[in-house]
Image (tube, rainbow, N blue to C red):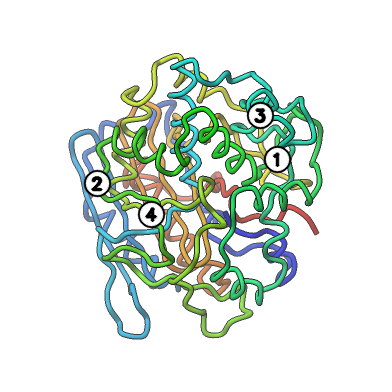
Amino acid sequence: MLARKLLTAVVAGSAILAAATVTTTPASATPATGQDLDRRALRETLAEVPKGGVYGIYSAVQHRRQSWRGAAGQADVSTGRPTRPDMRHRVGSITKTFTATAVMRLVERGRIGLDTPVETYLPGLLPDARVTVRMLLNHTSHIGDYDEALITKPEDLDALRVRQFTKRELITLGLGVGKTGEPGQVPGVYSNTNYIVLALLITKVTGEEAEEHITRSVIRAAGLEDTSFPRTPYLPRPHARAYTSAFGYYDPPRDYTVFNMSWASTAGGIVSTMSDLNRFYRALLGGKLVSPSSLAQMKQTVPVLPGEGAPAATDYGLGIFTLDLPCGGKAWGHDGGVIGMATNSLTTENLDRQVSTGVNLTWHPPAEPGEAAHVRHILTALCGAAQPAARSAFTLPNLDALPSRS
């Protein structure tokens, strides 16, 4: 959910969490699922994150029936208030998995066809009648990303924080950015606009506002008590403050906690806790929210670029992505980034291990050591503590933060 033109306007290159890499030795063909949850290693790797310049972090880890929650650093740098594991957090594009799950549940009921053109449901909305529902879900529609039009310079953040958008306004902005290719073309190009179109589709076939439908059909169905689409610019308590330096433009980093999230909506507007995110992905990937055939459809991936002309693609399905772990096996999940808050939630394919983390400082180059420590913490959660150093580099996908155009 991060604006990409801002990155090229302020710096050449990105210093954000997923750009950080750690080196590991590939272990075996299967993940380290037999090890017990190493609470000491989790505490130690988490503590390294604020030492490396990230203000605060909270984490929830699950290994089979064992669970751990931790927090480190500051939730509020002006008061020194510490972070807590149960803090509410803007999870950004992790919202896309919730939206995709709602769509798949409607597919199961015969209300939506995955390979049906959007034109069938929303005539005249899109200029290209070849775009299908599946293309929206897996970012092969090649509709432009409205983020490109929203933030082109740091000063735009202050105007954005108080502006109220309608979904149709966001779609119009995205269409104005221009196409990144032809519908169905691979690789796809990540675009938040796709998931705003899906919101209008959900409303069309259900008669409910998309946020209300997702709340009823997915959030409540998964038993999540601390997950919601807030209707005000304020975060529910307890929460951390949200900071960004816009890649050094603001020194010290500026507080953007109060923010009108109408610009994110069904592409990135959910607030949750790290424990709730683990619970959600465990329910989804465990087949409790969608049928086995629907989950298989969601796991059919295509390469998706974070932006037009970007060098590296992520294996993206229908609202979820997958990555290979250095300890063997795969993880499924999503990342999310909004102004001042970044999130990762990953679950191993066998459901044995999960980790969800949130940080409250983004776009801040001096925090690179903390970002690398953050990746090490995630690997400790997913692979166990016994990961020898140094052969192959491991980088988390970050579809929300890399520049798409120069």
In front: 277, or 69? Answer: 277
| Label 3 vs 2, first from the N-terminus | 3
Q: Mark 1 points at which residue?
A: 189
Placement of 242 over or under 306, stated as above or below? below
Residue at point 51%, 25% (across, down): 298
**CA distance for labels 2 and 4:** 11 Å
Compared with residue 96, is residue 303 higher up or lower down, i.e. above or below? above
Q: Mark 2 or 4 closer to N-term?
A: 2
User: What residue appears at the point 62 percent right and 39 percent down from the top-left corner?
Assistant: 197
Which residue position holds label 4?
271
Q: Which amino acid does label 2 sit on?
A: Glu
Q: Is mark 1 on a helix, strand or loop?
A: strand
Picture quadrant of residue 238: bottom left
Residue 73 picture location, percent across and down: 33, 72
- Left or right of 129? Residue 191 is left
Q: What residue type is labelled 4?
A: Val
